[in-house]
Amino acid sequence: MTGTIVEFDRVGLRYGTGAEVLRDLDFRLNEGGFYFLTGPSGAGKTSLLKLLYLAQRPTRGRMSLFGDELSQASREALPAYRRRIGVVFQDFRLVRHLSAFDNVALPLRISGRSEEEIEGPVREMLAWVGLADRASARPPTLSGGEQQRVAIARAVIAHPDLIIADEPTGNVDAAMAERILHLLTAMNRLGTTVIVATHDVGLIAATPGAQLIRLEKGVLVDPTGALKHPPAMPRAGRPL
Ligand SMILES: Nc1ncnc2c1ncn2[C@@H]1O[C@H](COP(=O)(O)OP(=O)(O)OP(=O)(O)O)[C@@H](O)[C@H]1O
């Protein structure tokens, strides 16, 4: 896989009339790549992910997704692109009145799959994230870590072309973090491009094939070469 799935060309983002929180972002993500997005709190990681999952438009520059230039695309054009993306939000964003099963089933239902095609994969995915016995529970009755696992299952169930995960292991223990990473790397091996924002050095160290993108105060610290010549992987224990 050698195609470009994401391309940013001097992209900037500001909220309202504030200062730019992202500046001059110039980078590419290759189809089938596994990327970690790191940087201090407030550096702009979530903002960059919001651009990628089309919840924010760049205020400057050009951005392409799946080969199409989208900075000026109409609002009506965006849902078709969003359906190709699985997102794990930092705050989960589960549908409160739906069970864990129905939350995970949502992307399959949206894509028109029959109930027979949905039942097995959803049960299997819930079992994988350790929630087989919580299938009928609604999000408000689940712990933060359980909600996070439902959110991850929902993001990957329909085998999207791109998975975007914002701190996907922030609320789970080390064993579950390893399981989640395994799930993401398995999806990646099947061809899905994965980008994970994280402060978790252990997660990065456990993913030798991944590339690092680092943001500091809204700019890529290696804007020209971060991805063409990725920096060395950090050693466990070194702060990100
Ligand atoms: N909706 C918003 N309106 C105004 N400013 C915002 C908004 N969202 C984020 N910001 C600002 O943009 C900057 C980058 O925030 P962002 O959440 O992208 O950082 P982050 O790197 O994801 O941080 P963390 O690691 O703490 O999640 C911060 O200064 C933040 O206050």
Image (cartoon, rainbow, N blue to C red):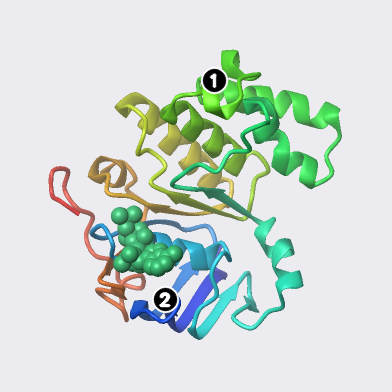
Specify whether 145 is left or right of 116: left
Spot occupied by residue 70 in the image (x, y as percentages of width and height): 63, 78
Residue occupying the far top of the picture:
133
Spot occupied by residue 235 in the image (x, y as percentages of width and height): 16, 48
- The front one of 122 and 150 is 150
Specify the quadrant that holds the N terminus. Answer: bottom right
Specify whether 25 is left or right of 107: left
- The front one of 169 and 32 is 169
Which image quarter: residue 112?
Answer: top right
Distance of mark 1 from mark 2, alpha carbons? Answer: 37 Å
Q: Amino acid at mark 1?
A: Leu
Q: Is mark 1 within 8 Å of ligand 1?
A: no
Spot occupied by residue 104 in the image (x, y as percentages of width and height): 65, 34
Disc 1 target residue: 131
Specify the quadrant that holds the C terminus. Answer: bottom left
Secondary structure of the residue carrying numbered label 2: strand
The answer to whether residue 222 is above or below residue 162 is below
Residue at the image position 43 percent from the left and 47 percent from the top: 90
Spot occupied by residue 165 in the image (x, y as percentages of width and height): 46, 49
Let me know if residue 44 appears in the view.
Answer: no
Residue at the image position 33 percent from the left and 50 percent from the top: 198
Let me know if residue 226 appears in the view.
Answer: yes
Secondary structure of the residue carrying numbered label 1: loop
Query: Circle 1: is it few (<14), some (14-19), or many (20+) Cα within 10 Å?
Result: many
Label 1 or label 2, whichever lies nearer to me, is 1
Disc 2 target residue: 27
* Count of residue discs: 2
Q: Amino acid at mark 2?
A: Phe
